[in-house]
Amino acid sequence: MIDIVVFALVAAIMLGMSLRGAKRGETFLVADRAVGFLPLVATLVMTEFNTATLLAFSAVGYAVGPRAIGLSAVFLIGLAWYTLAVARKWKRFNGVSVAGWFSLRYGVGLGRFAAVMLLTAMLGFSATYVKSLTLIVGPLLGNPEPWTLSAILCVALALVTMSGGLASVIRLDVMGFALACVLFPILFIIGLVRHGGPVAWTEHFRGEPLTVDYWLRWNDPQLPWHFVLSLVALTCMTYICSPWYGQKIFAARSERVAVIAVGVASVIVFILYASVQLAASLLPSDAASLSDPQMAVPTMLNQWLPIGARGLAYAVLFAVATTTLAGVWSAMVGMLVTDFGSQWSESVAVQRALTLLLAAGSWLGANLLVDDILNRLILANIPIAALSFALIGGFHWKPTSIAGAWASMMVGLIWGVFCFVYWGDAGGYTWYWAIYGAPLVFCTGAIVSVSIPDQRSPEVVLRPSTI
């Protein structure tokens, strides 16, 4: 009961501090384009640091040990690539919706198709986030019926997004960021202390020394390195098109702030995820046979933290989930009102109604479609990866044509779906999807662009614009 009271109190304070509404459409969606360096770093970190990935990665840490931090390095590389390849370009575009860039560069038809693919992917992400938060909060509240608990959580999360749009999301991000930077490294330190300190840790994992052989196991069935490499390739293909990152970049005060903030965020995201994975790798000594490894984080909180501190930790996790979901829903609303209904761009009431609809869709998806969080999280990236050539080519290669963009998108979409259907999770479809798919998408786009060129210059998209 003490934990529940602490959780409710801290969560209420964080939500209350974020509920200061915005009155204009652009403020609602991009926070007046005035976000400074530290708030931008906080919101970028908390956009990526989400409970779905947290549960999935901690499950791998529990199963395979410290080598699981290879998964955390995926974000370090992916966000570093975002920093170098597109952060400055997105800020120069300075729109409201990522899909709006595709409309300006390639025409409204392709732009709307890109928006549909991005919205589909984000609904999939949202469902995994709701599912993960339900799994995390459930043990604290006595494991209530999942449909009911997830509905309550979705309503609470929607209120944050509806209150003041991106400005509210960023205020909550800053609070959640500060708490997360304290909680998760401390959780790892507690695990070290409980298991004999750093020296004992080097031989802790089920009695196995952490030798070079342990770190270089290419075909370990629990975490093959080719799977990690495929995720690196997919992350580099998908993050550049990320609508939730794009919206935060549009809100930045300047190009310099945007670029440096993404680079710093990449390092912090890696540290936070790696801390949780390393902590989970210490858990088998206390809980050698979890029925569901995805419950590693709640198990650590329940077994390692004292009463009261557990409630605070659950409140931090609630903030982590809230900030990610609110950021994704805000980006989705931005696309809906700019790419499909520009007459709604100044109507906060319409944008709030759309947020409720997105919350309802996420709730249904979490309860009907999501079983294994990591696999469904990866699967939702198929539509985004298909956009990679159109984006990189449009930013960096002038001959990129509308026909080339269309061809690359269709090939990317068909190839990703084929790989999942043919090889599936058990067959390691991500390797075939990423390693063969990336050259296929880019070669198709380049060949068709050269064969069927455009008549207009692409330079227009580099000028600042609001959509």
Image: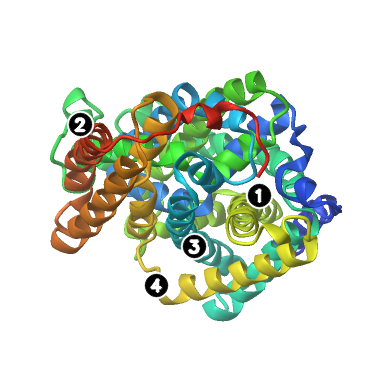
Q: Along the polypeptide, which appears first: circle 2 or circle 3?
A: 3
* Residue 335 image point, x, y percent: 59, 54
Q: Badge 1: how crowded within 10 Å, few (<14), some, or many (20+)?
A: many
Q: Quadrant of residue 70?
A: top left
The residue lying at 58 percent from left, 61 percent from top is 340
Q: Quadrant of residue 419?
A: bottom left
The residue lying at 39 percent from left, 42 percent from top is 238
Q: SS at mark 4? A: loop
- How far apart marks 1 and 4 lie (CA) works out to 26 Å
Describe residue 153's horizontal placement relative to residue 245 as left or right. right
Q: Along the polypeptide, which appears first: circle 1 or circle 4?
A: 1
The type of residue carrying mark 4 is Leu
The type of residue carrying mark 2 is Tyr
Q: Quadrant of residue 3?
A: bottom right
Is the residue 54 above or below the residue 183 in the image?
A: below
Residue designated by label 3: 123
Q: Along the polypeptide, which appears first: circle 3 or circle 4?
A: 3
Q: Along the polypeptide, which appears first: circle 2 or circle 1?
A: 2
Q: Along the polypeptide, which appears first: circle 3 or circle 1?
A: 3
Is the residue 204 above or below the residue 316 in the image?
A: above
The residue lying at 68 percent from left, 50 percent from top is 309
- How far apart marks 2 and 3 lie (CA) works out to 38 Å
Residue designated by label 1: 316
- How far apart marks 3 and 4 lie (CA) works out to 11 Å
* Total tally of numbered discs in the picture: 4
Return the residue nearer the eye: 175 or 34. 34
Residue designated by label 4: 369
Is the residue 297 above or below the residue 220 in the image?
A: below
The type of residue carrying mark 3 is Leu
- How far apart marks 2 and 1 lie (CA) works out to 33 Å
Q: SS at mark 2? A: helix
Residue designated by label 2: 214
